[in-house]
Amino acid sequence: MQMILKSNKSALEKAVDYLSIRDYSVKQLRDKLYRCSYDEQEINEALEKLKARHYLDDAQLCARQAQVYLREERYSIKALQFKLLAKGFSSEIVNNCLTADFTEYEKRAVIKILPSRLRKTTDREKNMQYLYRKGFSVASIRYGIDKLLKEE
């Protein structure tokens, strides 16, 4: 991994610059500052100041990001959890963001995804395997496939 040369700005100033462009999780911002060659203590101090001033809040950012993914209705809840974990949120924060019953959401997502899959193949088993690999529950998969095949 190539290290970026440290600028004349402090870690706090650099972090504010990054946050002025888009939101970052604490882990993402820590990684960016580390790649800029700031030392661990300076990074920690900068992140603590930003948290104290509410510029960094992983719980709120995770909730907003989860809502974006949920509106898209393209992902299973398991896939959504993995996407949020990959953004640097802790499993505790991710689990707190996704506390509702998502049975109906997954059914809608399966029904939204399946038509493009059914154009390629109407083989029920292949479509079930595809959706299962995407993290959807068996009940949601069966519901979606049954509903769409009955409509044809």
Image: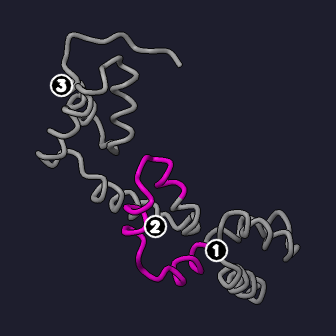
To which residue does mark 2 refer?
70
Q: Residue at x 42, y 80 (%)?
A: 100
Whether 92 is among the magenta residues is yes
Q: Would residue 56 appear left or right of 67 to someone viewing this image?
A: left
Tell me where residue 42 sits by quadrant. Answer: top left
Image spot of residue 45 (x, y percent): 19, 32
147 shown above or below 135 = below
The secondary element bearing badge 2 is classed as helix
Tell me the kind of residue under disc 3. Answer: Glu
Q: CA distance from mark 2 to mark 1?
A: 13 Å
Q: CA distance from mark 2 to mark 3?
A: 33 Å
- Residue 110's label in the rendered image is 1
The magenta segment is 82-110
Q: Secondary structure at mark 1?
A: helix
Left or right: where 148 falls relative to 66: right
Residue shown at 64% from the left, 76% from the top:
111
Q: Position of residue 86 (x, y in %)?
A: 50, 48
Q: Is residue 9 left or right of residue 79?
A: left
Kind of residue indicated by mark 1: Val
